[in-house]
Image (spheres, helix red, strand yellow):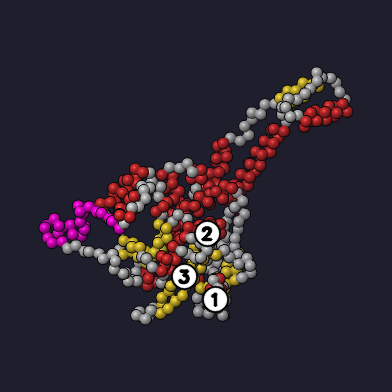
Amino acid sequence: MGLFDRLFKRAPKNASFAPMMNGWLPIYSQFGTNIYASDVVQQALKCIVDEFKKLIPTHVRTTGADPIPVSGNLQEVLNDPNPLMTTSEFLEKTAWLLLLNYNAFIIPTYYTWIDEKTGAERRRYESLYPIKPTQVDFIEDASGKLFVTFWFENAEKTTIAYDDVIHIKYNYSVSQYMGGNECGQPDHTALLQTLELNKTLLSGIAKAMKASYAVNGVVKYNTLMDDGKTAAALAELERKLQNNESGFLPLDLKADFTPLQHTSQIVDGETLKFIDEKILRNWGVPLAILTGDFNKEQYEAFYQKALEPLVISTSQAFTKKLFTKREKAFGNAIKLYPKDLIFMSISQTLEMINILSPTGALFENEKRVALGLKPLPELEGKRYMSLNWIDANNAAQYQTGANVSIDVVDENKEESEV
């Protein structure tokens, strides 16, 4: 069976369109792209995508409030999603599909078996594929199970159980199944008006500049001429302009040339800045982020407004579909960590190291990497902490002099699934 044969499947028998609360049929034609000819829109989306691809997808198991990274099959797939993409390329592709279409679909491929000890179905994931369908239909079988049929540009289609599809929605509001408007598409009505204003403004500037520089001076003839002689004089002037290579225009005593000064300001910078910022506000991208001239506070605001909602939606969508209810009950989740996104100065990095070092939360090589230094082999696995700390639960016993037991954690012991 080929790679893509596993992605294309047949619809279940006796299937019908899934019901919708508003009575419509759940058929969604993908996808609108008419706003993306604007360079400002493309640059704004690229700012978000370029930061999103820096995320680190991680399988964690949370015990209490402590998320523990889990090395295993899922983490292997997150580190190498499919034969065509690296992790950053996978995240980049997913982000573009989400921002362009307000919906992103990812199909995991896997095989299953029954655990002999527990009798539960187990999965081993092989790959994750972001797809770009042209039409999406939601259907259900006789038992009420939800399926989704994807139609593609090459007329191929596949039907997959919705539980097996990672579906990330953006601006999830009026549609029951899809992000965007009631048709499952981006609603850019208001934005198109601003883009049309921007286009008109720029076109007017171009025309005004051409008109401004089309007339460079006035030639005054000191004699009276009829229409025929005027036309001949103009033709002779045009010939001299075309043949001119020195920059000097030869004229006789009958004509005077008066140059025109081009000093008019067509559009002020504040107007252009207002239009750009009005477009950028649709995605929460400040102008400083677009130009790259931002400070820490501006970046933090950009992350919280434009990136963090996408991070949360993506993390929860992956967790919902890649784990069973039993696995999620034991704290298994997929988190997208923004380690490489955090914008800190050297002094702020040192402050972070000074705060975390006494708790043993940082390895020695992590400290070096945070400061831009290469890790050293002799520091591999070394981690130090202060002895001036005690478990908060044992503080009262420590103060009264009672014996306090110390729990030793064997980091090499293999963790069970649950």
What amino acid type should be assigned to the residue bearing mark 2? Lys
Determine which of the numbered discs, if any, sits on residue 1 in the image. Answer: 1
Q: Residue extending furthest front? A: 378
Label 3 to label 1, Cα distance in Å? 14 Å
For residue 35: magenta? no
| Residue at 38% from the left image edge and 79% from the top image edge | 115
Q: Which of marks 2 and 1 precedes in the sequence?
A: 1
Q: Which of marks 3 and 2 precedes in the sequence?
A: 2
Q: Which residue is mark 2?
A: 93
The N terminus lies in which quarter of the figure?
A: bottom right
- Helix, strand or loop for the magenta stretch, by majority: loop
Tell which tag, 1 or 2, sits nearer the viewer. 1
Q: In the rendered view, would you say 89 is above or below 23?
A: above
Residue range corresponding to the magenta coloring: 381-404
- The residue closer to the viewer here, 108 or 328, is 108
| Residue at 47% from the left image edge and 72% from the top image edge | 110
| Residue at 55% from the left image edge and 43% from the top image edge | 276
What amino acid type should be assigned to the residue bearing mark 1? Met
